[in-house]
Amino acid sequence: MCARPRLDRFILTGFGRGEKTRKPSCPETAPMTELLQSETLVPGDRWFALYTKPHKEYVVRDRLRSQGVDTYLPEISVAARRRDRRATKPFFPHYLFAHFDPSGGTIARLRWTPGLRRVVSAGGQPVAIPGEVVAHIRRRLADLVEVESACPFQHGEVVRVLHGPFEGLGAVFDRSLSPEGRARVFLQMMDRLVAADLDVCDLLPPR
C-alpha cells in the first residue's frame, strides 16, 4: 500500500520555494504532483495550510468556522468497527486549509487559536495555495475509504488507556480477543499487573 502523501512537502516544494516536486513513487500521489507542477495555476483563489497540535484538527476547524473563517479539513471515510467512533478522520494529520486575506490581520488573530501551531510558511511568509489544488484534493478524497485495523498493537507492547474507568493507566498488551476489537491487557495497578478486557480503540501508545 502506498504511503500517505506529506502535505508539507507538496506545499513547500510546489509553492514556497519555486522548485519542481520530485517524481512520486506512489501512483496515488501522481495527479496531485502534476497539478502542483502545472504552470497554468493562478493563485487568485488563495488558501493557506494550517499546522495543528496532535489530534486538534477538528478543534481548530470548528473554532475558525465559529469566527467566520472558511476552512477545509481533508478527511477520509473510515469503515469503523464501533458505532460510537468518528466516521471520518483527517487525511493529512495535523493539517487543514483556511481561506482568508493574509493582508487583513487574520494571520495575527490565527496565532491565538487553541490547538493551532502555525501557518505553513516559507521565508517568513505564508504559502498561498491555489484554489484548484484544494478542489483537486476534495475530488481525490471523495471516494476513498479506509478500513480500521482490528488490532494495531503487538504482544508485550506498552499502551495507555484512553477512555473508561481505567483512563490514564499504563498497561501491557497481551492479545486480541475478537474481530470486534476486544483485547486482553495487563493493567499496571499498585505494583501489580491485573488482567482486563478492553476495546482496542480505547488504547493508545504511551506518550
Image (cartoon, rainbow, N blue to C red):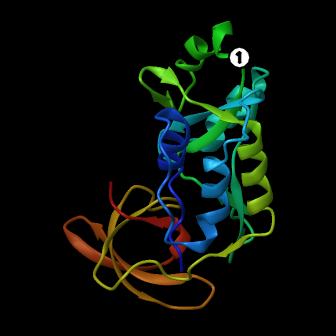
Quarter of the rendering occupied by the N terminus: bottom right
Q: Is residue 75 above or below residue 190?
A: above
Front one among 151 and 143 = 143
Is 1 left, or right, of 161 in this rendering? right
Q: Is residue 16 above or below residue 90?
A: above
Q: Look at 45% across and 57% down and name the residue there.
A: 167
Q: In the picture, residue 133 is in which quadrant?
A: top right
- Disc 1 marks which residue? 101
- Can residue 117 be seen in this snapshot? no
Across and down, in percent, residue 68 comes to 79, 21
Q: Residue furthest front?
A: 39
Is 167 left, or right, of 86 in this rendering? left
Looking at numbered disc 1 in the image, what kind of residue is underneath it? Asp
Quarter of the rendering occupied by the C terminus: bottom left
Front one among 137 and 193 = 137
Is 172 left, or right, of 12 in this rendering? left
Q: Residue furthest top?
A: 104
Q: Look at 71% across and 36% down and name the residue there.
A: 130
| Count of numbered circles on the image | 1
Q: Residue furthest left?
A: 191
Q: Look at 53% across and 61% down and name the residue there.
A: 164
- Can residue 169 be seen in this snapshot? yes
Across and down, in percent, residue 97 comes to 66, 37
Crowding near pointer 1: few (<14 within 10 Å), some, many (20+)? Answer: few
Q: Look at 50% across and 52% down and name the residue there.
A: 21
Q: In the picture, residue 199 is in which quadrant?
A: bottom right
Front one among 121 and 59 = 121
Across and down, in percent, residue 63 comes to 69, 28
SS of the residue under disc 1: loop
Q: In the picture, residue 31 is in which quadrant?
A: bottom right
Q: Residue furthest bottom?
A: 178
